[in-house]
Image: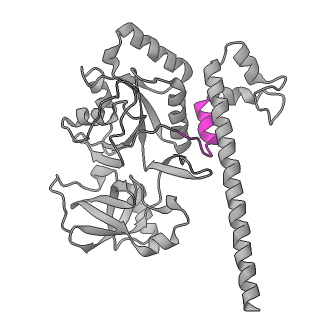
Amino acid sequence: MKSNSNKNQYTLEDFGYNEYFERCRSKQKLDLLNVGRVISEHKERYIVKTQSGDFEAEIVGNLIYSSQSRADFPAVGDWVGVTEYDEGKLLIHSVFPRKTILERSAVGKFGEKQIIATNIDFAFIVQSIDRDFSINRIERYLTICNNSKVKPIIIISKVDLVDDEELAEIKKSIEERIKGVPVIGISNETQIGLDELKNTIEKYKTYCLLGSSGVGKSTLINTIMGEALMETGNIGEITNRGKHVTSHRELIVLDSGGILIDNPGMREVGIADMQDGLKLSFEVIDQLSRNCRFKDCTHMHEKHCAVLDAVQNNEINKESYENYLKMQREKDHFESTEQEKRRKGKDFAKMVKKVKKIKKK
């Protein structure tokens, strides 16, 4: 294969290939296909990284027609079986089974999910200290990570804008609500915390950057890489909102051996069917709920509710409790909408069969 990229050559292992994916390849009898990893995707146009370099790619018709939903299409982070059909261009024949899937409720599409990235080992949850800093939002990202069995690391950016005492208070407020998750304060301007962050990145592991627009994700990648690899934008002075600079997902192999995936800033972090994620993110609430008098306790108004008692006794942070309830409602709404869509789909299929039978008569 001839690459359209002049960048350094890599082995499959360099960008995350391991025994798990090799077993998947053998199990699906894909030995005759070349292997690559999807490193960017924009409106079903893909760039796939192989040992020979980076290639433009598209999906074969059979994969399109056999897909049950958009989730069956390749996503950034996927390992795929490919062949070359033209100089510098590939056809994607198969998507390998995914080890992990980071996803959220699709914006504006009730009952549907959107894949953020696949085959992720760690997620950097990036929050800027100078904007709409919110531990509630961190808990949302945390729930997405926990539901996908992706290890989270919380990054507080632009810490040069506060003094050491303020930073210590912010870290303390996070750690009081979120237990056992590393919190690193960094500054792209002064380089504070960047060595600590770089030291967390393991060779051959894939890291995903999660956060709103303007929190400094692309600037962080440029700092780690030591070059202006990603375009960055300034925060609007009037609105104090970040500009959407990253318009699609992109995978980058670091010189240190780790792999980074940048994502578009997410204004909405919708919760889908994430019961496991909620349990892990709000472990104290989950454990206390076992002591509630009623098994189906909503933890909102019931008597003898262990969770409500703990909130009233300040054993559970009230904001965290309210955030939990909000996400629980979103999860329930998503599941009910998803069930309704499935019911309508089944009813439509029955109607089509009925019409076909009538026509045959």
Question: Which one is nearer the viewer's eye here, 10 or 307?
Answer: 307
Q: In the rendered view, would you say 19 is above or below 65?
A: above
From this viewpoint, which residue is outermost toward the front?
238
Q: Is residue 346 left or right of residue 255?
A: right
Q: In the rendered view, would you say 151 is above or below 250?
A: above
Q: Residue 202: x percent and y percent?
A: 33, 38
Q: In the rendered view, would you say 42 is above or below 147?
A: below
Q: In the rendered view, would you say 131 is above or below 251?
A: above
Image color mode: one colour
The quarter of the image holding the N terminus is bottom left
Q: Residue 181: x percent and y percent?
A: 48, 27
- Residue plotted at (29% across, 68% down): 90
Question: Which one is nearer the viewer's eye here, 106 or 11?
Answer: 106
Q: Is residue 197 left or right of residue 112?
A: left
Q: Is residue 10 left or right of residue 21?
A: left
Q: Quadrant of residue 125?
A: top left
Question: Which one is nearer the viewer's eye here, 234 or 40?
Answer: 234
- Residue plotted at (45% across, 75% down): 62
Per the rendered image, the range of residues in magenta is 269-282
From this viewpoint, which residue is outermost toward the bottom?
361
Question: Which one is nearer the viewer's eye here, 360 or 326?
Answer: 360
Q: Quadrant of residue 91?
A: bottom left
Query: Disc count in the image?
Result: 0
Q: Residue 65: x percent and y percent?
A: 50, 73
Q: Is residue 281 left or right of residue 333?
A: left
Q: Is residue 179 inside the magenta stretch?
A: no
The quarter of the image holding the C terminus is bottom right
From this viewpoint, which residue is outermost toward the top?
165
- Residue plotted at (28% across, 63% down): 56
- Residue plotted at (50% across, 35% down): 141
Q: Residue 86: x percent and y percent?
A: 24, 74
